[in-house]
């Protein structure tokens, strides 16, 4: 093989390698842009702050029981908080409703009122209302206060 031909072959090979590396970087960037969280109970995720924390809402429509779990920003770990309760205002079928979520003690996990990640609300209208718009009035988690957080159930508020 002549020197000019070897040079041409080497340059071509380098260009192909560079193109492959560039495509790999683009794929990595695209994968990072698609940031997903998976609620551990298969419920509705509600983002608090810039994904600092999440609430996961889980409805049992047969009983009208709605549970809320306080989770970290990745929805991987439960976050116990001191709040004894928190409120959510809702609009369903043109009617305003208030939901009060109260702290749930669990002897199996050592959680108690004032040190729990689970909160429950009960309302008969939840038995027949599969979707509603809502606003978390106020919730403090580890010194950070979240107010007027709007979301849809079961859509959540994560726009990614």
Image (cartoon, helix red, strand yellow):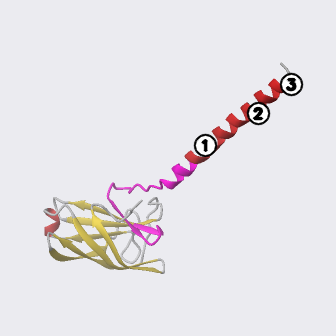
Q: CA distance from mark 2 to mark 3?
A: 12 Å
Q: Nearer the viewer, mark 3 or mark 1?
A: 3
Q: Which residue bears the numbered disc 3?
A: 3
The correct choice, above or below, for 44 with respect to 17 in the image is: below
Q: Which residue bears the numbered disc 2?
A: 11
Q: Residue furthest front?
A: 4
The kind of secondary structure element at disc 2 is: helix
Res 99 → quadrant: bottom left
Position of residue 40 measured from the top left corner of the image (x, y, whole percent): 38, 56
Residue toward you, 86 or 106: 86
Q: Which residue is painted at 68% across and 34% down in the image?
A: 16
Point out the stretch of residues depicted in magenta. 28-54
The kind of secondary structure element at disc 3 is: helix
Q: Which residue bears the numbered disc 1?
A: 24
Indicate whether residue 152 is drawn in magenta: no
Indicate whether residue 43 is drawn in magenta: yes
**Which of marks 1 and 2 precedes in the sequence?**
2
Position of residue 22 measured from the top left corner of the image (x, y, whole percent): 64, 44
**Which of marks 3 and 2 precedes in the sequence?**
3
Res 12 → quadrant: top right
Residue toward you, 132 or 122: 132
The correct choice, above or below, for 72 with respect to 97 in the image is: above
Which quarter of the image is occupied by the N terminus? top right
Residue toward you, 74 or 158: 158
Q: Which residue is painted at 76% across and 33% down in the image?
A: 11
Q: Which residue is painted at 86% across and 25% down in the image?
A: 3
Q: Which mark is residue 126?
A: none
Q: Nearer the viewer, mark 2 or mark 1?
A: 2
Res 122 → quadrant: bottom left
Q: CA distance from mark 3 to mark 1?
A: 32 Å
Which quarter of the image is occupied by the C terminus? bottom left
């Amino acid at each position: 093989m002549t020197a000019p031909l070897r040079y041409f072959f080497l340059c071509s090979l380098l260009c192909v390698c560079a193109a492959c590396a560039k495509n790999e970087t683009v794929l990595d960037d695209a994968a990072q842009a698609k940031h997903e969280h998976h609620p551990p109970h298969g419920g509705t995720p509600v983002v608090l702050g810039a994904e600092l924390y999440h609430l996961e809402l889980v409805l049992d429509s047969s009983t009208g029981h709605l549970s809320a779990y306080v989770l970290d920003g990745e929805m991987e770990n439960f976050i116990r908080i001191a709040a004894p309760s928190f409120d959510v205002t809702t609009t369903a079928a043109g009617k305003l409703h208030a939901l009060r979520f109260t702290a749930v003690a669990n002897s199996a996990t050592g959680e108690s009122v004032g040190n729990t990640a689970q909160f429950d609300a009960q309302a008969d209208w939840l038995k027949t209302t599969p979707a509603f718009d809502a606003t978390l009035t106020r919730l403090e988690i580890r010194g950070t206060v979240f107010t007027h957080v709007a979301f849809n159930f079961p859509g959540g508020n994560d726009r990614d």
